[in-house]
Image (cartoon, rainbow, N blue to C red):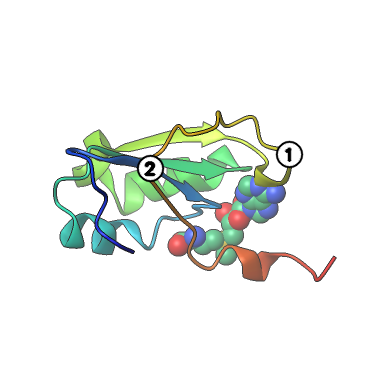
Amino acid sequence: MPAPQTARPTGYDLMAGTGEGWPHLLKRFPDIGAITAVDISSGMHRRAMQRLHAHRAHKIAFIEDDVLASDLPDASADFVVSTFGLKTFNRE
Ligand SMILES: C[S@@+](CC[C@H](N)C(=O)[O-])C[C@H]1O[C@@H](n2cnc3c(N)ncnc32)[C@H](O)[C@@H]1O
């Protein structure tokens, strides 16, 4: 990912699941203000926050949303990432 051009950038992780990318993202760009995890399932997010990400919880927000029919506002993020998300879908 190219370096975001804003101070304390915020962005979305689509189909965030357990957030395996967050440690790497925050290590590479320590200035990140917040990552908003977007996932259709809040349960997986809640468990991952307790088990894996408690010490970075102040940098992680969550929105329960279907990314294929999303209400996320236009131009509301400085970056968007998705790791191992697309593999979930069939070709259609
Ligand atoms: C393989 S996991 C993603 C792994 C995750 N990105 C990571 O780095 O740990 C797939 C995720 O996509 C979510 N998901 C599937 N369909 C979705 C949809 N239509 N909208 C949002 N999330 C969806 C699932 O709930 C699941 O958490």
Say whether residue 2 is left or right of residue 7. Answer: right
Is the CB of the residue bearing disc 1 within 8 angstroms of ligand 1? yes
The numbered dot on residue 37 is none
* Residue drawn at x 34%, y 44% as measured from the top left: 50
Cα separation, mark 2 vs mark 1, equals: 18 Å
16 and 29: which one is in front? 29
Which percent across, then down, holds residue 30? 14, 51
Which percent across, then down, holds residue 53? 29, 49
- Label 1 neighbour load within 10 Å: few <14, some 14-19, many 20+: few
Relative to 50, residue 82 above or below: below
**Quarter of the image where one finds residue 77:** top left
Give the residue number, with chain letter if any, for mark 2: 11
Q: Which amino acid does label 1 sit on?
A: Ala
Q: Which amino acid does label 2 sit on?
A: Gly
Kind of element beneath mark 1:
helix
Give the residue number, with chain letter if any, for mark 1: 69
25 and 54: which one is in front? 25
Q: In which quarter of the image is the N terminus?
A: bottom left
Q: Quadrant of the C terminus?
A: bottom right
Relative to 91, residue 22 above or below: above
**Quarter of the image where one finds residue 25:** bottom left
- Label 2 neighbour load within 10 Å: few <14, some 14-19, many 20+: many
Say whether residue 7 is left or right of residue 19. Answer: left
Say whether residue 69 is left or right of residue 76. Answer: right
Q: Quadrant of ligand 1?
A: bottom right
Which percent across, then down, holds residue 71? 64, 29
